[in-house]
Image (cartoon, rainbow, N blue to C red):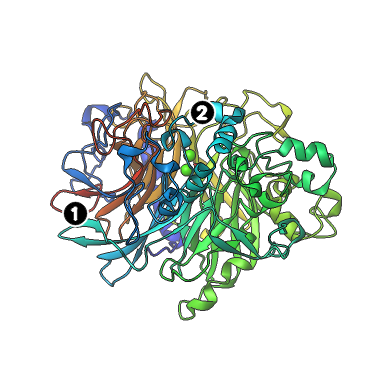
Amino acid sequence: MPKRSIVSSPAFQDLLLQRVTRRSVLQAGVALAPLAVAGCGTSEVSASAPAHGLSFQPIKGSTADAVILPHGYTYDILVRWGESLASGVPDLDSTRLAGGALLEPRAAEWQSRQFGQNCDAIHFFALDANAERGLLCVNNEFPDGAVMFPGHPKFAEAVRGKATAYVRQHPHSAAASQASVGVSIIEIVRRNGVWTRVQDSRYARRITANTPIDIGGPARGAELMRTRDDPNGHRALGTFGNCAGGQTPWGTYLTAEENVHDYFGNHALLQKERGLHDPIVEAHQRFAMWSTHSLHGWEGADSRFDMLRNPTEPFRFGWIVEIDPKDPAKAPIKRTALGRFAHEGANPIIAPDGRVAVYMGDDAKFEYVYKFVSERRFDPKKPDRNSQLLDEGTLYVARFDAGGAGEWLPLVYDEKGPLNESSGFRNQAEVLIKSRAAASVLGATPMDRPEDVEANPTTGRIYVACTNNDARRGESQVAHYRGHEIDLGPNAANPRAINKFGHIIEIREADDDHTARTFTWEVFLLGGDSEGGKLLSSLTNVRNDTAYYAGYSNASEVSPIGSPDNIGFDANGNLWIVTDGEQPDGSNNGCWVCPTTGPDRGCLQRFLSGPSGAEICGCRFSPDGQTLFLSIQHPGAEGTVENPRSHWPDGPGTQPRSSVIAVRKLGGGRVGS
Ligand code: FEO
Ligand code: CA
Ligand code: CA
């Protein structure tokens, strides 16, 4: 498990100084271009190896249906969707998918013990002192019916009721679909530098849309959390929409429930039946489900997902769930103190006084950045007590001010206001269940889809990946948008209209203390085309087609990026970025890296190109930095079982299958070196 700590202020000052020095060199008009050869580090004045340790030969973007890596690198596939995790359970036979293999009577039961679909977050938990054996906790984000079942509609048609109709006609499909999502835990071992999966591991397990999960924290037992089947509001069934995640200092896994609004039907009928002023209807306002039919259609076979019959069931989703990977008997717990929204991830760091801060993004257009700070302190000597840290504490939301300052605003119920009955909250549980509405009352800054938010372990600075936002307007315009009045125009932290390629914000907490109530921030990167004079060396005159890579301005050295989604850090504090969306050069999604300090800060280099249609997720290193674990999610997206649009990973004639890969350097060495 990577140790996270923060540096003292002097170290930060040094870094800042280096950066200012470099900028003044650039401003003085010293041309770096003649010295430049492809690759970072060429601008280093010293003859010694650059401190960032990156010396791989960057690759160009590609549209090939393949995983492409720099020269001298390779990857091993650790697990594919459908591989059996339990003895007595067969592997999914993907050659039979088009013939309806997943519609057969035992398919759902098997799927619930096979590796899940659409792998996303990955975290590594060592099982021995050398970390040569460990567990991977992997999210399985969503079911893509079109690549699972013959005749199933694609998403564009699914929302018009066709997925629900399909499920009604093929009720087994809902059970198989529910069994394909959630979390997979696998055991892996490294021999001679190569990781392989351990078959029949005693730790291997699945958590699906039907696994019992305890509800912890302030919303446990709250009125809005009670359902017909769980009148006490203490235990939910399942988790889904599991996007990114996190790893606690006490060795547990955090999985983030993101797009849970895709799973419930009949929202409009509920509104019609109860009226818009009904407290349950009102509570759904800012985290609305699809109005009639859900994206996945489960309500066609399972009344739990029919809002007319179970109007409070959706409130039990959209949380951070804590899982102990080393204790398969322990039920996962929904940690409601961390709020309810489209959680992308949850990244903890121990603050100087021992309290734990957890950084989180709400991945939706014009939603917010959050931080939870525990009330009590982490104690490595009392692991049992640490598991309670996420139940008591304060949830904050970020306001980014125009001059580079910012404030964390507490989401705390107070009868004197602002979060009280007159603003729509009767108690702390309701503040948390309706986190988005509470954050709006407090004046949080609406962002361009904040995804991963994570502290750099070497500097303590926080990076916020904002994927994109095609709805951001060019000028201030207050309008009704998804349940509230909001300014859709640009703000200092989201400066571009129609933000097609996304950006990254860098935050420094006051006194480098992760429990701080105030911070400073700057734009670290504006994704987009770095060619044709579009790369800015400073943030003046930002247009929606300009790019900015932390002031690095040698366009011939940087690799353009779009749609940053998940991030990770290596031991040198370099920022690794994986993407989900359009690229400026029209290439497939991939993985990039750039130094965050020193003269090469912002020199972004492309490290990987993914298969057709896939997004790249995960982005975690083994403790020795010699392996980069990545999820290749939804290769062949937009295809069907009848007409697959990718044949990765198994080649021509095969169905595409989301898989976890382990990237390594041939002959050994740190990834990136
Ligand atoms: Fe599931 Fe925000 O990506
Ligand atoms: Ca994501
Ligand atoms: Ca995404």
Which residue is labeled 1 in the image?
669
Check the image and name the residue furthest to the top.
Answer: 532
Instruction: Report the Cα–Cα distance between label 1 and label 2.
Output: 40 Å
Q: Secondary structure at mark 2?
A: loop
Q: What mark, if any, has residue 27 been given in the picture?
A: none
Q: Which residue is farthest front?
A: 105
> Residue type at mark 2?
Thr
- Give the residue pinned by disc 2: 540
Q: Is mark 2 within 8 Å of ligand 3?
A: no
- Of residue 448 and residue 196, the one placed in the foreground of this image is 196
Q: Is residue 94 left or right of residue 547?
A: left
**Callout 1: few (<14), some (14-19), or many (20+) C-alpha neighbours within 10 Å?**
some
The percent coordinates of residue 575 (x first, y second) are 38, 46
Can you see residue 463?
no
Q: Tell me the quarter of the picture where residue 489 sits.
A: top right
The quarter of the picture where residue 533 lies is: top left
640 in relation to 176, above or below: above
